[in-house]
Image: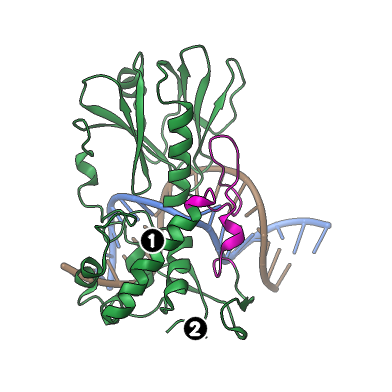
Chain colours: A green, B brown, C blue
Amino acid sequence: MPELPEVETVRAALQLAVAGKKIKRLSHAAARLRYPLDPDVISRATSGRMVKAFRRRAKYIVVDFDDSINDCLVLHLGMTGSFRLAAKGDPLGTFDHVVWELEGGEQWIFTDPRKFGEVAVEQAAAGEWPERFAGLGPEPLSPDLNTGYLINRFKGRKQPVKTAILDQNIIAGIGNIYASEALFRAGIHPGRAAGNISRQRIEKLVLAVKSVLEDSIASGGTTIRDFKSLEGKEGYFSLCLDVYGKAGDPCAKCGKKATIRRVKQSGRSTFYCPGCQR
DNA sequence: AAATGAACCTGTTTGC
DNA sequence: TGCAAACAGGTTCATT
């Protein structure tokens, strides 16, 4: 469900609603999500601590606490994960897997039907990222993602450019929606070998990646069916999608000339316009 | 090494 | 209409 813009939307909402509050205790924890969950570890790492800030790296949300212990909470929404705040005593649903009671009784709840999400405790010094993030590619909205970098990473690769930009170790945070959308904006065919794209067109791709993510964040992300931010709000970038989920529709750019096509790449759907993507 | 496919799990949509 | 197959925004592990 959530790619960088959706995760960023959730992070910002959590920062407003939860940062500065103290966690009283872990009141519920399922046996496992993507990985087995150790309630003792999570409880010890969170109970009685004041939440200082929510940071984001790739599609991960990292929770920092307001003390000098060098650890943090790492959260991942998987495909269907979401957070919500509920009043004291509100009943839990089947898929409410992790629940913290905040000071005052409010419940901070992680829900995830498919259980692809993650809640974990990691070591990290203040301002640093956990060691496990070391291999992640640059944040797409930072200057670290630039033409020179991408040319280097693409060099010699026969892999289709769509699967390449989906690789979190090449660029962090792009998912299946924005991979298709960015390639459309850049006019690049998703099946083209990553190592076979001119410098000029890679420059276009870098700009396209940044613009599509920025535009989506400004719209609160994309809701196809599940995505909701903390307050239950949907993201309306769905209205701005050019190709994702639009197989058979006429291309917005070249009009009647071509219709959007759907193909499979590495087991995942890719949408593109055969008319304006080369 | 690089690239693809399967697996994890549940709900919803599509197609015969 | 009914049922089974396909599909869904992600990541990791196994296999070629």
| Place of residue A257 in the rendered image (x, y in percent of width and height, measured from the top left) | 60, 88
Indicate whether A151 appears above or below A109. Answer: below
Residue appearing at x 38%, y 61% in the figure? A210
| Place of residue A104 in the rendered image (x, y in percent of width and height, measured from the top left) | 50, 11
- N-terminal of the pair, mark 1 or mark 2, is 1
Label 1 or label 2, whichever lies nearer to me, is 1
Give the crowd class for mark 2: few <14, some 14-19, many >=20 residues within 10 Å.
Answer: some
Residue appearing at x 56%, y 69% in the figure? A242
Residue that carries the numbered disc 2 in the rendered image: A276
Three-letter code, disc 1: Lys
Magenta-colored span: A217-245
Three-letter code, disc 2: Cys
Quarter residue A148 falls in: bottom left
Residues marked 1 and 2, same chain: yes
| Place of residue A107 in the rendered image (x, y in percent of width and height, measured from the top left) | 52, 21
Residue that carries the numbered disc 1 in the rendered image: A210
Give the crowd class for mark 1: few <14, some 14-19, many >=20 residues within 10 Å.
Answer: some
Quarter residue A243 falls in: bottom right
| SS for callout 2 | loop
The answer for how far apart the CA atoms under marks 1 and 2 are is 20 Å
Indicate whether A18 appears above or below A77. Answer: above
